[in-house]
């Protein structure tokens, strides 16, 4: 289906805009980073490069290059037609929810977003907000804040296995890691080692590794990974205290 969609898009672009070149990026989480995407367009290794210079100064073939996503162009079109209503797209998924993508007001809190879309579970839960696997963890008592960053919300039941969730994240980061910088490459490897022996985890050491990754990784993949882990550990600590 995706291949057919791309083929139709490519044919339409070539027919209506013959002076433009259509490029299909190879996929992967890192291609969401602008310099990595530029590297793949130039048929080079999919890894981020040092900034500055920024793409708007030196991008493809060292020419100034603008990198935007589809949502940006969508809202530019709305603004040009004077139809922009201060909204954004929010993807909601997870436990007992009406999964989907919703266009909602920027001013709404996370709590209101879930309630207005009929996605607010009746039982206690926690949510991973903004950035998918890199999103921060919040309890259902702490959702009156606005959705900032990537428009994604994943719902988990309160008693969801936290180790299982961490393993899911680390599998993702192992697959998407480019291996360019030591803090991220080695940090992900060590976290994976720990999670394979959950009864032996040194939680203090895990926090030290996560903080080191956040402070010294080369790109967003490495310094955003700790968001999920550290906020989940904080949530887990508070939750266990209350249970005991």
Image (cartoon, helix red, strand yellow):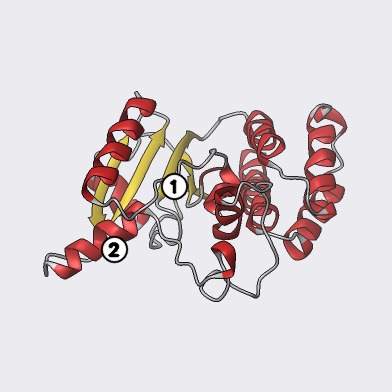
Residue at (23% x, 43% y) in the render:
15
In the image, residue 198 above or below residue 20:
above
Kindly state the secondary structure of the residue where label 1 is placed.
loop
Q: Are marks 2 and 1 in contact (CB under 8 Å)?
A: no
Q: Which mark is residue 140?
A: 1
Are there few (<14), some (14-19), or many (20+) residues within 10 Å of tag 1?
Answer: some
Residue 207 versus residue 66: which sits nearer the camera?
A: 66
Relative to 119, 238 lies left or right? right
Residue at (33% x, 60% y) in the render:
72
Residue at (85% x, 46% y) in the render:
186
**Residue 183: image location, x then y, percent:** 82, 54
Residue 99 in view, yes or no: no
Could you tell me how far apart the alpha carbons at marks 2 and 1 are, in whole angstroms? 20 Å
Which quadrant: the N terminus?
A: top left
**Residue 218: image location, x then y, percent:** 73, 61
Residue at (57% x, 40% y) in the render:
28
Residue designated by label 2: 106
């Amino acid at each position: 289906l995706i291949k057919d969609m791309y083929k139709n898009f490519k044919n339409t672009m070539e027919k209506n805009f013959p002076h433009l070149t259509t490029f299909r990026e190879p996929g992967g989480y890192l291609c969401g980073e602008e310099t990595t995407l530029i590297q793949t367009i130039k048929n080079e290794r999919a890894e981020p490069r040092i900034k500055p210079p920024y793409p708007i100064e030196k991008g493809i073939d060292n020419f100034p290059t603008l990198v935007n996503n589809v949502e940006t162009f969508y809202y530019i079109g709305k603004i040009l037609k004077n139809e922009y209503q201060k909204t954004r797209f929010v993807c909601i998924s997870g436990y007992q929810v009406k999964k989907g993508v919703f266009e909602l007001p920027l001013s709404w809190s996370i709590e209101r977003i879930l309630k207005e879309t009929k996605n607010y579970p009746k039982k206690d839960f926690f949510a991973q907000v903004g950035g998918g696997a890199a999103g921060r963890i919040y309890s259902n008592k702490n959702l009156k804040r606005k959705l900032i960053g990537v428009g994604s919300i994943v719902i988990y039941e309160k008693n969801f296995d936290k180790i299982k969730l961490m393993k899911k994240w680390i599998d993702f980061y192992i697959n998407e890691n480019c291996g360019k910088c030591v803090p991220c490459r080695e940090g992900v490897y060590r976290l994976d080692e720990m999670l394979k022996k959950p009864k032996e985890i040194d939680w203090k050491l895990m926090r030290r590794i996560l903080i080191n990754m956040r402070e010294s990784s080369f790109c967003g993949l490495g310094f955003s990974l700790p968001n999920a882990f550290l906020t989940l550990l904080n949530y887990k600590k508070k939750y266990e205290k209350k249970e005991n």
